[in-house]
Amino acid sequence: MSQPKISDSAVRRLSLYLRALRELERQGGDLVSSRELAHLCGATSAQVRKDLSLFGSFGKRGRGYSVGELVATIEEILGLGRRWRVALVGVGKIGSALLGYRDLEGRGFDLVAAFDIDPAKVGRRVAGVEVSALGELERVVAERGVEIGIVATPPGAAQEVAERLWEAGVEAVLNFAPVKLTAPGSAAVRTVDVVLELEGLCYQLSSGAEPRERRER
Amino acid sequence: MSQPKISDSAVRRLSLYLRALRELERQGGDLVSSRELAHLCGATSAQVRKDLSLFGSFGKRGRGYSVGELVATIEEILGLGRRWRVALVGVGKIGSALLGYRDLEGRGFDLVAAFDIDPAKVGRRVAGVEVSALGELERVVAERGVEIGIVATPPGAAQEVAERLWEAGVEAVLNFAPVKLTAPGSAAVRTVDVVLELEGLCYQLSSGAEPRERRER
DNA sequence: AACTGTGAAAACTTTCACAGCC
DNA sequence: GGCTGTGAAAGTTTTCACAGTT
């Protein structure tokens, strides 16, 4: 499965659908229409159907989609049918907040290692994860089979840390440092930048541009 | 200024350009070509020129763009020619990390209030900001002229908190809770969701889809 | 009647390629 | 020669609208 190459925004929407579907499942929902699901996610029904139809026909005409099946299908599409091993580099404020974010586990992500350059932090346990010395990165990443790295270092260190992660075999990096990471061809990178998001909000406030509404008649 | 309505991704790129330009400015850079700037931001030179040309002609043919002028121009476009007053709701792990994130101030955002429902936290100062009771939200937001709200509450409380912020006159919300916020027409909302980003990385890892590279010959 | 799946159309975004200027 | 600014072309994403299914 997962053949078609889909856009970044389609991947984002699939994640949103998944989140809504799990909530429906929890509430005992059985069937859901594209209209309902769209409403829950701020999309349109046509968009929902199109996104899903790229991967197959999962709905029942006249009735809708089975919530349970759709959860399983989207998990499969996104590669979430298994658990992922994650390592965190940089146990500062954001890093600690992430270590304490128990939701990750519930969503299939196991934080199996944490690193910091500060000797005062090394050896401590933060939210159940032992902090290792930065020098141990390569060894620990290999030993624990880390697949995803989270970079939460100061900006000046981020590129180097990311390179060490790639070198050590980590193919995906989630970056919280406000810098552009230059990655080798095959690696996946996403950056979360709070200032950038705030600036986007300012633009909307200043330009008076309504955020284009998606309405469903 | 700021007349043309530009896409969300264009706004994001402008923020990225700005970040790179400030760094260039700090290093004493004087002129920059669209090629260089693109390289620093992971865009293409044509994209940079197009983005900027939507707002006017700021470059000098044959030479490039003045770094200083461009910083000022993009700040103007994004509405960053002034300071913005921000309030945080939810002083948990993420909330505390944000309060401690001194970079916000350097980028024009003043954290002027923080709220929490937990009486044990109310009255404390976190990173120089006093935590107020949630019940005081309306009063404090009005008194301090808050313009942007950050929602860092548990998911169940996020919609209600956001509604109170909108009611109190806050027109922009940055949401860290993993839920879709339903906003009144004119309000601007952005959501930061770590799990969603991780899921996006998993898709790339599993599908083996190379993240389309942007190369400049 | 209700709803999916999907081609076709529309809208939007990015890239190309080159005239014009320094 | 090097670089911007920009129409036109190419590419991508979203929306429409309806045939087909239960």
Image (cartoon, coloured by chain):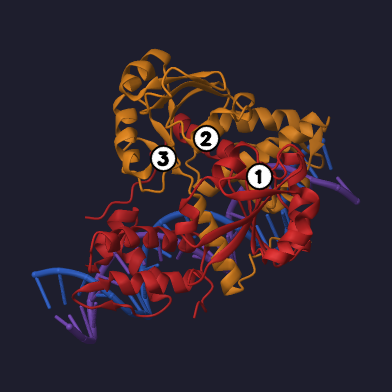
Chain colours: A orange, B red, C purple, D blue
Quadrant holding the C terminus of chain B: bottom left
Picture coordinates of residue A208, whole percent (x, y): 61, 73
Q: Quadrant of residue B40?
A: bottom left
Q: Is residue A60 above or below residue B37?
A: above
Question: Residue shown at 73%/54% (left/top)?
Answer: B162
Where is mark 3, residue-wise? Answer: A189
Where is mark 2, residue-wise? Answer: B198
Q: What element does badge 3 sit on?
A: strand
Tell me which label, 1 or 2, sits earlier in the chain. Answer: 1
Around disc 2, counting alpha carbons within 10 Å, would you say few (fewer than 14), some (14 to 19), or many (20 or more)? many
Which chain is mark 1 on? B
A76 on left or right of A46: left
* Same chain shared by disc 3 and disc 2: no
Q: What element does badge 2 sit on?
A: helix
Q: Can you see residue A146? A: yes
Picture coordinates of residue A182, whole percent (x, y): 31, 43
Residue type at mark 1? Ala
Residue type at mark 3? Val
Around disc 1, counting alpha carbons within 10 Å, would you say few (fewer than 14), some (14 to 19), or many (20 or more)? many
Picture coordinates of residue A85, whole percent (x, y): 48, 22
Which chain is mark 2 on? B
Q: Disc 1 and disc 2: Cα gap in Å?
A: 19 Å
Where is mark 1, residue-wise? Answer: B152
Q: Quadrant of residue A66?
A: top right
Q: Is residue B96 above or below residue A87?
A: below
Question: Residue shown at 24%/67% (left/top)?
Answer: B33
